[in-house]
Image: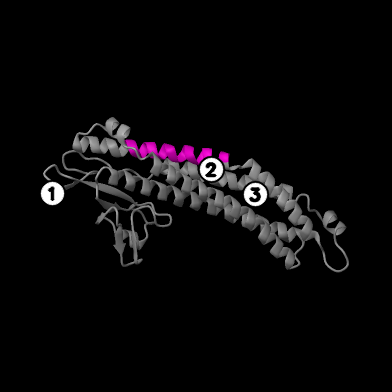
Amino acid sequence: MKRDLSLPEETPLKAVPYPRGAENKFERFMQEMTRAIAQQYENETFKKLNKKTVDKFEDAQVGNWARIFTTLSNKAKAKINKRFNKDRVRDKVTQILRGLNKASQSTIFENVEKVMGINAQDLIAKEGLKPQTNALIEESIEWVNRNLDETLADFSANSLRLMAEGQPVEEVLGGFKTIAGKRVESSKFIARNQLANFNSFNNKIRYQNLGITEAIWVTAHDERVRPSHEDREGKTFKIDKGLYSSLDGKTLIPGVDYNCRCIMKAIIPDDDD
């Protein structure tokens, strides 16, 4: 016989909740950084690339103001990369994810203590998952750095494309602002998706380290839940394999699909198992 770690009949316990607080922190960090990057890029390029500057560097055959823009753009990128250097990004991402890891660890082990009678502090002291957690944090840092690089590449590439189409400086600036807005918005989803992945894989590793092999899929129970995830609701699955749904043709664990807010409720075998 097996019982649900989160909701045993004897002691009602909650599953590890979806980490809203950490998600909000990560989203704010990503969006604020992207806005700051966009503002600095605009200041260092378009506000220096006025009509007088463009006219000065045009010739009778081909306007070469794109070359001047590229020079300004490269200087702007260098300054931005120095401002948002890898150490600064690493410190902020690590701070957020270590806080999430600590909260998830405490919740899981407190649940285990109530169900199995094993001291939570002893479990924390003996866990030994630091290398795995560090690897997940490094993966998230890589995603944040990649987003920064792609944002700067989008700014310059889109602007040069509009210049190639013969658009005036004002139109190129308008196109930049549109791209900047989209990058700010997309950074929120990148943060949300990466945090959910970190949380899901970290909990998966922690459960497996405790010898737990099965869990129950739990959705967010709202109108945003996609049909393929609703199809998995309440079903038991092997943690190391995930759960298949014919609606999307995927085998997943909660939290790893794009923008997935689902969680798992671990199942602990009874003593007689």
Q: Which residue is mark 3?
A: 38
Disc 1 on helix, strand or loop?
Answer: loop
Residue 62 coordinates in the image, percent (x, y): 83, 67
Q: Looking at the image, is mark 3 or mark 1 earlier in the sequence?
A: 1
Seen at 26% across and 42% down, the residue is 210
Question: Residue 49: image x %, image y %?
Answer: 78, 53
The image shows residue 12, relative to residue 72, as above or below, that is above
Q: Secondary structure at mark 3?
A: helix
Q: Label 1 vs label 2: CA separation?
A: 46 Å
Residue 119, percent across and down? 24, 31
Q: Residues within 10 Å of mark 1 (few under 14, many from 20)?
A: few
Tell me the kind of residue under disc 3: Ala
Q: In screen coordinates, is 195 left or right of 157? A: left
**Disc 1 and disc 2 in contact, CB within 8 angstroms:** no
The residue pinned by badge 2 equals 29
Tell me the mark number nearer the camera, choosing from 3 and 1.
Answer: 1
Q: Residues within 10 Å of mark 3 (few under 14, many from 20)?
A: many
> What's the residue at 46%, 39% (across, down)?
96
User: Disc 2 residue type?
Assistant: Phe
The magenta stretch is 87-106
Q: Nearer the viewer, residue 25 or 221?
A: 25
Q: Which residue is mark 1?
A: 1
Q: Position of residue 92 (x, y in %)?
A: 52, 39
The CA distance from mark 3 to mark 2 is 14 Å
Q: Amino acid at mark 1?
A: Met
Q: Pointer 3 and pointer 2: residues touching (CB < 8 Å)?
A: no
Query: What coloring was used for the rendering?
Result: one colour
Is residue 59 among what the camera can see? yes
Which quarter of the picture shows residue 127? Answer: top left
| Quadrant in which residue 99 is drawn | top left
Residue located 37% across and 45% down the image: 202
